[in-house]
Image (cartoon, rainbow, N blue to C red):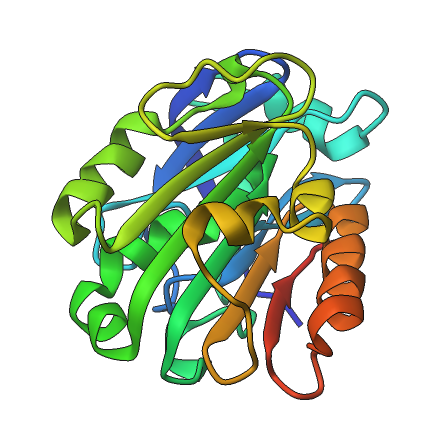
């Protein structure tokens, strides 16, 4: 059961390729970085909603969400059409176990995302620097996108790397539909699944993935999540049951 709060759009930014960001007032119950909530519109006295991760931490004044307009998506098109001052509904509660506290202490934490799946990692990395550094020896943040112009929040990501150090937080972008020219990161072209399957990333990072040393967080497109989990199971016998992998998916 959700308790819905009517909330005003305070900020709206349209990125390229149907990606956009909105900010709302932070007037909900406390949440852990990495969790998600529900955004909704009211239609015929019913709330039509979808789940979205926070980009921000709970301590920030505003709530921020990074969204993708789906061509035939009813709610995403309504959210995309919002302007500053318009109202939507947000759940009072937050959900999910995509939380650093739940992860084991291990050498390498892999954070794999596609598109807007980068959101929970931005929240986690802003909020938990001391905890993360005490739990992991290295963090690999992988942002798999279609086009170079989809590399949004790059300033926030680079500022996070400065805080952690470039020998601790490794930034990797993977561009699937054109040549990767993003010089501020370690750059690859293709698909995350092919790069993992063919050991390209493992060799580049000089990491021999093992159950005792690696944990994978995976967020984004459900097909990507399923494929990455299958590859990790096939190659390393990783699975959700053994808690080698933590996933977040909303549909």
Q: Please report the residue visible at 70 percent of the width from the left and 55 percent of the height from the top.
A: 250
Q: Please report the residue visible at 51 percent of the width from the left and 72 percent of the height from the top.
A: 215
Where residue 16 appears, x then y in whole percent? 55, 11
Q: Which residue is more in the foreground, 35 or 1? A: 35
Residue 228's place in the image compared with 17, above or below, is below
> How many numbered badges does the structure rendering display?
0
Q: Which residue is more in the foreground, 30 or 214? A: 214
Q: Is residue 231 left or right of residue 3?
A: right
Q: Please report the residue visible at 31 percent of the width from the left and 24 percent of the height from the top.
A: 184
Question: Which residue is the extreme one toward the bottom?
Answer: 242
Q: Which residue is more in the foreground, 218 or 96? A: 218
* Residue 105 falls in image quadrant: bottom left
Residue 111's place in the image compared with 189, above or below, is below
Where residue 145 appears, x then y in whole percent? 59, 29
Question: Which residue is the extreme one toward the right?
Answer: 72
* Residue 40 falls in image quadrant: top right
Residue 46 shows up from this direction? no
Q: Is residue 74 left or right of residue 56?
A: right
Q: Please report the residue visible at 47 percent of the width from the left and 39 percent of the height from the top.
A: 65
Residue 230's place in the image compared with 88, above or below, is below
Q: Which residue is more in the foreground, 153 or 3? A: 153
Residue 154 shows up from this direction? yes
Where residue 60 appears, x then y in whole percent? 22, 50
Where residue 188 appears, x then y in whole percent? 54, 29
The N terminus sits in image quarter: bottom right
Q: Is residue 149 left or right of residue 127?
A: right
């Amino acid at each position: 059961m959700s308790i819905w709060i009517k909330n005003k759009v305070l900020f709206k930014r349209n990125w390229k390729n149907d990606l956009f960001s909105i900010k709302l007032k932070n007037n909900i119950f406390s949440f852990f970085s990495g969790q998600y909530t529900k955004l909704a519109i009211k239609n015929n006295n019913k709330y039509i909603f979808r789940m979205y991760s926070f980009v921000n931490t709970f301590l920030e004044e505003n709530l921020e969400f990074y969204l993708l307009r789906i061509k035939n998506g009813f709610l995403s098109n309504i959210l995309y059409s919002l302007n500053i001052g318009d109202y939507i509904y947000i759940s009072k509660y937050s959900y999910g176990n995509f939380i650093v506290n739940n992860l084991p202490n291990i050498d390498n934490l892999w954070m794999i995302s596609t598109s807007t799946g980068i959101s929970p990692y931005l929240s986690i990395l802003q909020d938990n620097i001391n905890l993360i550094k005490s739990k992991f020896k290295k963090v690999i943040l992988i942002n798999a996108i279609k086009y170079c112009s989809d590399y949004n929040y790059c300033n926030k990501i680079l500022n996070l790397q400065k805080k952690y150090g470039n020998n601790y937080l490794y930034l990797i972008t993977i561009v699937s539909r054109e040549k990767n020219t993003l010089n501020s990161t370690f750059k690859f072209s293709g698909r995350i699944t092919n790069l993992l399957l063919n050991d390209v990333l493992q060799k580049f990072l000089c990491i021999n993935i093992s159950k005792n040393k690696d944990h994978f967080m995976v967020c984004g497109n459900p097909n990507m999540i399923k494929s990455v989990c299958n590859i990790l199971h096939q190659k390393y016998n990783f699975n959700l049951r053994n808690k080698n992998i933590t996933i977040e998916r909303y549909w």
